[in-house]
Amino acid sequence: MGEGEMVSASARYLAPSAPGDAWGAEAAAAGRRGTQKVVRAGGVAAPDRVADLLGVERGGQVVERRRIMYLDGEPCELTDTYYPVGIARGTGLAGTAKIRGGAVRLLAELGYVGVRAQEDVVARMPSGSERAALSLKDGEPVLELTRLTLDAAGRPIQADVMVMPSRGQRLRYEIRIG
């Protein structure tokens, strides 16, 4: 890993794990400190792309958890996670409190286990609010990773939209063939 580079593998965030914080554990394994802050949670009108991913009517209600991820005290990622209302309403997913064991574990306890995920990664220029939140320089691009998690029946249970500075990022994908 190069100086300032953080290697992230998506798999650790997709399966229920032991109690703890997957992001904090990943950062600690690299000798760094990873923390997060939930800045907003609750029902929102689904953005068109999220509605399409979750299979809900455009503008229909979904539950959103908006977080800022920090690495060594500096903002490094904006993460918006969306859930169908029928899954998340009235649960810890709809609140700003830390979820013991994480959201994936809570989903599993509620009977929603992801078995397949689709990810799309694009490079683009940030919005003004993204630039400010991530302390980016003018002209500095971001990576946007969109992930959809599906259950065994192919139903969408979670959609994530993550925005991060492109500098120092390396995404690692391991694919089992066959």
Image: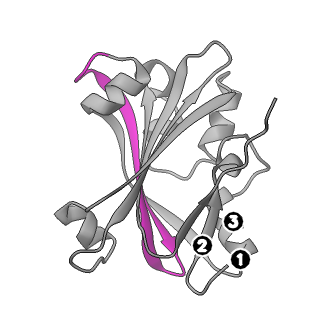
Compared to residue 14, the image places residue 173 above or below, namely below
Q: Residue drawn at (70%, 29%), measured in percent from left and top?
A: 109
In space, the residues marked 3 and 1 are separated at their CA atoms by: 7 Å
Taking the image as drawn, is residue 101 in sight? no
> Mark 2 and mark 1 in contact (Cβ < 8 Å)?
yes
Magenta residues, start to end: 57-79
Quarter of the image where one finds residue 67: bottom left
Height in image: 30 above or below 148?
A: below
Residue topped by disc 1: 30
Residue drawn 55% across and 16% down? 155
Whether label 3 touches label 1, CB < 8 Å: yes
The numbered mark, 1 or 2, whose residue comes first in the sequence reads 2
**Label 3 crowd bin: few (<14), some (14–19), many (20+), radius 10 Å:** some
Against 133, residue 51 (above or below) is: above
> Residue farthest to the bottom?
3
Residue of label 2: 6
Question: Residue 78 placed where, x, y %?
Answer: 39, 59
Is the Cβ of the residue at disc 2 closer than 8 Å to that at disc 3? no
Q: How far apart are marks 2 and 3 (CA)?
A: 9 Å
Instruction: Give the residue type at disc 3.
Output: Glu
Nearer the observer, 44 or 115? 115
Residue 33 position (above or below residue 166): below
Residue 93 seen anywhere in this rendered image of the structure: yes
The secondary element bearing badge 2 is classed as: strand
